[in-house]
Image: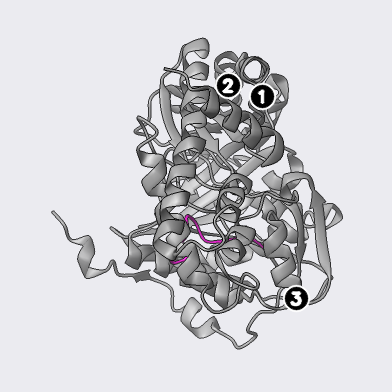
Amino acid sequence: MLNVYDILETIRMIQDECLDIRTITMGISLLDCIDSDIDKACAKVYDKITRCAKDLVKVGEDIEKEYGIPIINKRISVTPIAIVSAACNCSPVKFALTMDAAAKAVGVNLIGGYSALVQKGFSAGDVELINSIPEALAKTERVCSSVNIGSTKTGINLDACKLMGKIVKQSAEMTVDKACFGAAKLVVFCNAVDDNPFMAGAFHGVGEPDCMINVGVSGPGVVRSALSKYPDANITEIADIIKKTSYKITRVGQLVGVTASERLGVPFGIVDLSLAPTPAVGDSVAHILEEIGLEQCGTHGTTATLALLNDAVKKGGVMACSRIGGLSGAFIPVSEDAGMIDAAKSGCLSLEKLEAMTAVCSVGLDMIVVPGDISEDTIAAIIADEAAIGMVNTKTTAVRIIPAIGKDIGDELDWGGLFGCGPVMKINNKSASKFINRGGQIPAPLHSLKN
């Protein structure tokens, strides 16, 4: 039975507290598009994406109007292109151009899946696709890329870490005229999931249905507002408030996902109940941590408060939805969070502190700008460190790091919109090259042996 108070509360959350659906993402399998002739394969890819997603944007806009719920992004994820392109034996950049054209044709914001899964080694097509990533991201507007280099079950592919250090640097260099934006569309994962609706890391896993709808919710401003009403609550009560608020936020995501699924005639996948911030005032995960009691995000106690927040978000959200998936928890992208930006600029938030925080949050080192003269091996070592946290803790971790070519500490890259702006953060310049150049596979942890 509908409750008038609940309806009014939801309206207030939308109008005053930045509640929105961050994305509805249609996952599309391209396995039936594989062909040894790249032109034929690309034609099949374009036809399938435009056929499946032709009504995605319209349905999203209709739901927005009917329910008054902002849906910020409509997106597409596809089967990792390294799988699709393996049969072609030529440069896969043409697939990226095809994906970009299809995304523009149906009107979505971004399309993910220019991806490779190399956690245990390189199969046919993987190295070729990875080496083509900088060119593909430079030549396209809406294509996003990801590479999974490790997992709890397989360990960490150190050769892939080294290669990705080079690819991240090249992606920034090839888009220096666009504030190095190519690197902002590239994520390196450990324990990547098949049903992530958030970019730039989304791809459609091979075990997923032919086509499906996944939803990513948001709402940091709602959580902060709820906490502000209880300034004297103890920490147990704080956790309970977050759980109750997360429940309400996730119910909105469930409604949108089920409705979109019915209207598009495709299965409903999951709701990713992550708190995804934006640079907008009042929509910051860092400000939630500060509401709990920190003077500024990054100070001592930050990891503990983030662990509390992440756990409470999951506990509240899981009761509100029939299918939880994706990454689910709290995101801490520096450039996309007004509070994180302020903390990084003041020096309170360091790269080392962010790494500690990634052990208890949803993803990892996200949208971090570093000096442009950073070495490829240092990037690779940062990737390896973050992958180790994910591997040992059986969680998804990721690195989306942007070398600011021609810039140094104190400078800034500004992309506007949801990507925000990023202050160049200090890095440790001592070399890890000998470690990275050893190559090979970091073995899986003992607790991976569960069969």
Asked which secondary structure carries label 2, the reply is helix
Residue beneath label 3, please? 346
User: Is tag 2's residue or tag 3's residue first in the polypeptide sequence?
Assistant: 2
* Badge 2 vs badge 1, beta-carbon distance below 8 Å: yes
Q: Amino acid at mark 1?
A: Ala
| Mark 1 vs mark 3, CA separation in Å | 42 Å
Query: Residue 398, percent across and down?
Result: 51, 58
**Is residue 90 visible in the rendered structure shown here?**
yes
Residue 285 among magenta residues: no
| The quarter of the displayed image where residue 322 is located | top left
User: Is tag 2's residue or tag 1's residue first in the polypeptide sequence?
Assistant: 2
Residue 363 among magenta residues: yes
Q: Nearer the viewer, residue 62 or 161?
A: 62
Q: Nearer the viewer, residue 96 or 192?
A: 192
Residue at the left extreme, as displayed: 451
**Is residue 371 visible in the rendered structure shown here?**
no
Magenta residues span 358-368
- Please name the predominant secondary structure of the magenta segment in the image: loop
Q: Nearer the viewer, residue 399 or 416?
A: 416
User: Is tag 1's residue or tag 3's residue first in the polypeptide sequence?
Assistant: 1
Asked which secondary structure carries label 3, the reply is helix
Residue beneath label 1, please? 102
Query: Residue 320, percent across and down?
Result: 39, 34
Numbered circle sitting on residue 49: 2
| Mark 2 vs mark 1, CA separation in Å | 6 Å
Q: Amino acid at mark 2?
A: Ile
Query: Residue 37, percent across and down?
Result: 54, 26
Q: Nearer the viewer, residue 385 or 247?
A: 247
